[in-house]
Amino acid sequence: MAQAVTAGPAGDERLARRSPLRRLLGRPELGALLGAVALFVFFSVVADAFLQASSFSTVLYASSTFGIMAVGVSLLMIGGEFDLSAGVMVTSSALIAALTSYQLTLNVWAGVAISLVLTLALGFLNGLLYVKTGLPSFIVTLATFFMLAGANLGVTKAVTGNVASDSVRDMDGFAAARKVFASQVDIGGVSVTVTVFWWLLFVAVATWLLLRTRAGNWVFAAGGAADAARAVGVPVARTKIALFMGVAFCAWFLGMHLLFAFASVQSGEGVGNEFYYIICAVIGGCLLTGGYGSAAGAAIGAFIFGMTNKGIVYAEWNPDWFKFFLGAMLLLATVVNLLVRRRVAR
Amino acid sequence: MSGLIRLAGVGKDYGNVIALRDVSLEVGEGEVVCVLGDNGAGKSTLIKIIAGLHRHDAGTYEVQGEPVAFSSPRDALDRGIATVYQDLAVVPLMPVWRNFFLGSEKRKGPGRLDIGSMRRATRDELLAMGIDLRDVDQPIGTLSGGERQCVAIARAVYFGAKVLVLDEPTAALGVKQAGVVLRYIVQARARGLGVVFITHNPHHAYPVGDRFLILKRGRAVAYHAKDDITRDELTALMAGGTELEELAHELGTVASDAGGEMAAEARRLGLPDGE
């Protein structure tokens, strides 16, 4: 990955000043932004319903549920790692809150808090396993992915005798929790799900964290060249564990949204979603090998994802083809990113 | 001469492999100590001990008279010992200024980076060392190898290093670039820093070194001040005199004119140093 950048001319050692345009082209999210604009225009033309405010709100909602996870996943990817357990962790987190509050007859907020602690512990465990074993995070989280998927089903069945958790709709605190995690906000007559605002907030915080704080510096360094970072005193292991916990935090938040939007949780949900999150991050310009990318890019990636997801429906195409388009989009986005980066490096 | 760091009888094993045995070394202020040796001589083990990446098993390691056993590079850095590695000095995709301050970021408030002052400091500091970077925001990977080494060295000096440990800083560089780095070593010495300069090239070591430690198969085979040794002796020691004789003989028996020339050349130079 370093080679892509170092492959500059070896003649004179001084570089000419980069023009503002080239600077712009060097932004990791540029390819995704162009793609998002193209896709928006495309669906506006082929799908009449696409430009209606209510449809757009639906697109934003779909984008936000994936975008919230993409925040954590993109940060982790910039830090050089994957989390394949991210999809089922969302379900685990929702199940923990639902089962503990229902079985122990607690206020749902107690379940929310217990879920936060336990989900963060899951993220910590992912990070700790990665740091201690030195195995690729792909393998470590593949293992925890299967373990969580099994535990979700096994525990839920053992506790409730069913594959879904019992409804928490009538429990204390449900209304308040729903307000925070799953309410509808009226913006000029259009109903927008509150997750959209949470998503934007998370993206803003993650962007600030990455570019303006010491922790962000360490994330880039840990992903870009872990050994070099360690040699100058960056706590690489701690940074990576924190990143896994960041993914867990996002999973907890989305889990809470799903729980309070639907009141009960299907224990088999979430499998396969981890790839969508990774796709959002990669379309958004995060380098698979780490050290490069942005939270804003991942947000644009999630927006592309949401537009494709709903746009196909509004265009009245066969939604069975959604995944085909998604795959094609991923390919296109990564190729565009590659070309942009090569051009800048030259 | 006040000793900044002093190693006495230091040894290190990796399992049943003896990587280093009974090596002694002293670096004072404004002094360049060159550590020479072929591949596998124990040079990297020695720097890893000095840099705090590994702990020594035997002997003593003193910093300014105090015995130490570092558990991380951070500990060594805190004692003023900064190590610049040949291949892992920088994070290529990060901007120059972020690399310069990586691990010792300037902050205004908890966690918040003081970006403006770091940019300025990077530009000024590099300019002082003769590198004119107009854009400190470019990824450091776009700089040449020599410049990257110099940024890493400048960083160590800026953060108050008393001892610089340089791991083969000239190995991957062309003649001109290597010259740039050697000049910085001399500059650092003039500023009163102690320098441990690891190399396998006696022609890079001789002009800048005050003392020379030659390692072979984990042991010190020679430790000389500059007055006690000539460049040719150093070269011969470094290559291992007898081995070089054999090489010359072997090349001689190839018999062709070219072979004879090469043999003569090898005898004269001590070692091919074209890397």
Image: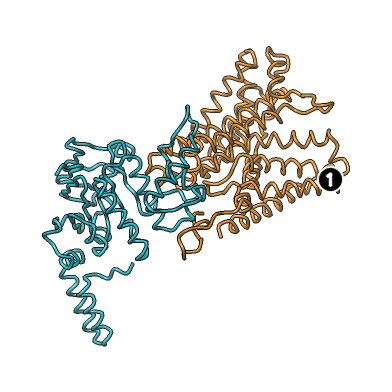
Chain colours: A orange, B cyan
Work out which quarter of the rendered image holds the N terminus of chain B and state it: top left
Work out which quarter of the rendered image holds the C terminus of chain B and state it: bottom left
User: What residue sits 61% from the left and 14% below the top?
Assistant: A104
Q: Chain of mark 1?
A: A
Q: Nearer the viewer, residue B148 or B93?
A: B148
What is the crowding at mark 1: few (fewer than 14 residues within 10 Å), some, or many (at least 20)? some
Residue pointed to by mark 1: A44
Q: Position of residue B263 (x, y in %)?
A: 22, 79
Q: Quick one: SS at disc 1? A: helix
**B65 above or below B269?**
above
User: What residue sits 30% from the left and 57% below the top?
Assistant: B182
User: Is there any visible trace of residue A1 in the rendered image?
Assistant: yes
Q: Quadrant of residue A269?
A: top right
Query: Is residue A213 toward the left or the right of residue B227 in the image?
Result: right
Among all residues in the image, which is located at the extreme left? Answer: B228
Q: Quadrant of residue B43?
A: bottom left
